[in-house]
Amino acid sequence: MSNDFLIFLFLIFTGAAVLSTVALCTRQSLLVAYMLVGIIMGPWGLKWIVDSSTIEEIGNIGIIFLLFLLGLHLQPQKLLHTLKKVSLIVLISSILFFLIGFGIAQLFGFNTGESLIVGAAAMFSSTIIGLKLLPTTVLHHQHTGEMMVSVLLLQDLLAIFSLLILHGAGFQAFTWTQFAFVLLALPGLLVFSFLFEKFILRLLFRRFDRIHEYLFLLAIGWCLSLSVLAHELGLSAEIGAFIAGVSIASTPIAFYIAENLKPVRDFFLVLFFFSMGATFNLTFFSAVIFPACLLTVLILLAKPTVFSLLFRRIGEPKHISWEVGWRLGQMSEFSILLGYVGVHEELLGATALNLIQLSTMLTFMVSCYIVIMRYPTPVALSDKLRRD
């Protein structure tokens, strides 16, 4: 390891530790601290770390592991139950939130393609924030958590589909042959993954189930293998990681892998959220601050209200419906990922990307603060509300 890279990691994680302490004392999300470290130390701040592209590449591995872990919790039976219960809620809410994002982008002069991506970015809520601020020791919150996870799960599937569309739309001179190949690549990858799991991985898991280190390495190898294969097939590495997780979700060791992979995921997620802040170009601040603030206000008002009304329509109590709405009342890490993919595929300009980044960061900050003031969380402002 070169000294430069060691200093690189020292600055990021020491800075993150310092600001995380401040965040915990003020009951903010740690993700906010990671982003602020990126803004402060990055190429548009103090310039202590200039090569943010390297960090972005490393940080994207965190998203790969995040999607792999999401897939590990997605069993086919659970998916069918989820679809029946909240599919209409996710469909209606996604359309409304899309129209808000699209309308704001159009209002401020962004082209139609950019407005479509901004609208898509507004559809999703943060899986990380939603789950990290949810206590699990109270029966009421177990039910609240089930509803939240159901919505977030379907939103994640919708995000995967959006990434697939963006990736396909980014092909230059996209031909029908390329379209057919990409269209067939996804089901082909699904079939391959489940056959490989059934005839090879399952046998290996059973044969060496007592050697935990081997199970851990095999799971990571499987995740990264399908990520690379998906990328080579014209899909995205994130889609491959998600499919890898789903393919082994029904195995007995899925829970063990999910629990033991979380520290690895968290390490890379620190880098990802650092890169989110580091790549926020402060020279665009004046150009995006007003539309970002307007989009933030509309999202923070619309999401709790819409989710509350829709959950009450399916028979949930008023207080639970509002709580779920507030806990889902922000944009998502997938919003940033959509922006990155849009820029990579030359469908999104730098101004639109910074609009998505700033709006996401603002909704993260305000939403976290609202939730910890009103509802039980592991980091609530009041001892009465603090729950593990």
Image (cartoon, rainbow, N blue to C red):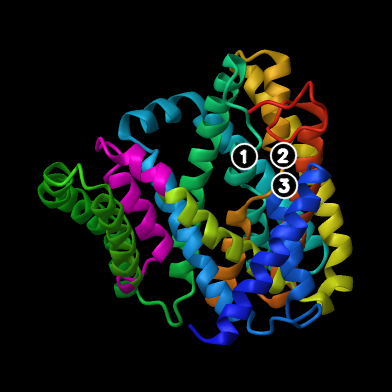
**Residue assigned mark 2:** 329
Please give the range of residues in magenta. 232-260
- Please tell me whether mark 1 sits on a helix, a strand or a loop: helix
Q: How far apart in space, not on screen, are marks 2 and 3 (Cα)?
A: 14 Å
Q: Position of residue 134 (x, y in %)?
A: 63, 31
Residue at the spot x=24%, y=38% of the render?
A: 251
Residue 235 among magenta residues: yes
> Which amino acid does the dot numbered 3 rest on?
Ser
Label of residue 29 in the image: 3
Q: Do the numbered discs 3 and 1 sit on residues whose CB atoms are within 8 Å?
A: yes
Label of residue 132 in the image: 1
> Which amino acid does the dot numbered 1 rest on?
Lys
Q: Position of residue 286 (x, y in %)?
A: 89, 72
> Which amino acid does the dot numbered 2 rest on?
Gly
Q: Do the numbered discs 2 and 3 sit on residues whose CB atoms are within 8 Å?
A: no
Label of residue 358 in the image: none
Q: Is residue 128 left or right of residue 165?
A: right
Residue 227, picture quadrant: bottom left
For label 3, count other residues whose C-alpha is less than 10 Å away and answer few (under 14), some (14-19) or many (20+): many
| Closer to viewer: mark 2 or mark 1 | 1
Residue at the spot x=58%, y=31% of the render?
A: 148
Helix, strand or loop: magenta stretch = helix
For label 1, count other residues whose C-alpha is less than 10 Å away and answer few (under 14), some (14-19) or many (20+): some
Q: Position of residue 164 (x, y in %)?
A: 44, 61
Q: Position of residue 55 (x, y in %)?
A: 58, 75
- Please tell me whether mark 2 sits on a helix, a strand or a loop: loop
